[in-house]
């Protein structure tokens, strides 16, 4: 019996196939890959997959890996565990990632970066994905897009002109629906009567 956590080698071996799927779909590796980082299993596994495909000469290059932690739960960014991590992005509210070493290796070997994004930046990306792309993800997932947008605003290089950028969204919005519910207007109840409905609609 083994635990299904970010130290489980079987889990990481399964997760690395996301890199295979991305490369197979694109016909190449992306230039940059942004991922939310909590326990750091995804970024560790994805980098492992890209390296395997490169070693097997399926792809000619590997992407720069960009890990995005919530500012209130950014132990890798700060270089030390966070005793009481706090962020609205519950899935990445982790103060001491299980795959810390793997994440650092992915960042360093790919010449990427690990960065922190604020809760407000995460919520901005969360709303953008829903309103512009029709994608309902959990807030933690939006950290990858928040990291991309922050890097763009700061004028930092993201990829060569005409390059390919991938942002991983790791969880559906129903995994953490409270944020979406809090932002909704409560519908007004109208009696099941046609005249009442007409009156409410101003007809």
Image (cartoon, rainbow, N blue to C red):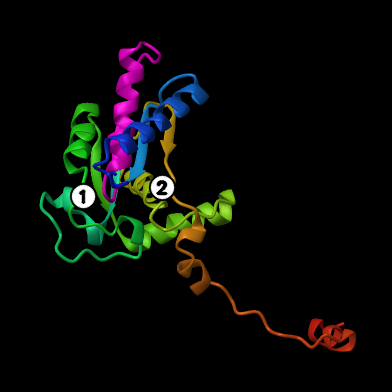
Q: Which residues are magenta?
A: 37-66
Give 122 or 152, whichever is nearer the viewer.
122
Label 2 crowd bin: few (<14), some (14–19), many (20+), radius 10 Å: many
Q: Earlier in the sequence, mark 2 or mark 1?
A: 1
Q: Which residue is rendered at x = 39% and y = 15% of the image?
A: 59
Give 28 or 19, whichever is nearer the viewer.
19
Rendered image: mark on residue 64: none
Q: Is residue 27 above or below residue 9?
A: above
Q: Position of residue 175 (x, y in %)?
A: 46, 59
Q: Which residue is rendered at x = 24% and y = 62% of the image?
A: 72
Give 190 or 129, whichever is nearer the viewer.
190
Residue wearing tag 1: 97
Residue wearing tag 2: 145
Residue 55 on the magenta segment: yes
Q: Which corner quadrant of the image does residue 63 belong to?
A: top left
Residue 77 on the magenta segment: no
Q: Position of residue 68 (x, y in %)?
A: 30, 47
Q: Is residue 98 above or below residue 21?
A: below
Q: Position of residue 200 (x, y in %)?
A: 79, 85
Label 1 crowd bin: few (<14), some (14–19), many (20+), radius 10 Å: many
Q: Which corner quadrant of the image does residue 101 belong to?
A: top left
Residue at far top of view: 57
Secondary-structure class at tag 1? loop
Q: Which residue is rendered at x = 37% and y = 44% of the image?
A: 148
Q: Which residue is rendered at x = 11% and y = 49% of the image?
A: 79
């Amino acid at each position: 019996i083994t635990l299904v956590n970010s130290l489980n080698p079987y889990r990481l071996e399964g997760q690395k196939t996301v890199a295979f799927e991305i490369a197979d779909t694109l016909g190449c590796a992306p230039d940059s890959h942004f991922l939310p980082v909590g326990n750091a299993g995804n970024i560790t596994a994805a980098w492992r997959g890209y390296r395997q495909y490169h070693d097997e000469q399926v792809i000619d290059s590997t992407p720069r890996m960009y890990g995005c932690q919530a500012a209130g739960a950014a132990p890798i960014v700060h270089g030390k565990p966070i005793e009481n991590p706090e962020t609205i992005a519950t899935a990445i509210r982790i103060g001491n990632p299980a795959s810390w070493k793997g994440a650092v290796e992915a960042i360093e070997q790919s010449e990427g970066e690990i960065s922190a994004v604020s809760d407000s930046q995460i919520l901005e990306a969360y709303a953008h994905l829903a309103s512009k792309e029709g994608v309902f993800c959990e807030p933690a997932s939006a950290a990858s897009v928040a990291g991309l947008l922050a890097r763009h605003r700061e004028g930092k290089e993201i990829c060569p002109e005409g390059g390919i950028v991938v942002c991983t969204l790791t969880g559906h919005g129903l995994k953490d629906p409270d944020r979406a519910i809090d932002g909704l207007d409560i519908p007004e109840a109208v009696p099941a009567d046609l005249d009442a409905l007409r009156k409410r609609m101003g007809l």
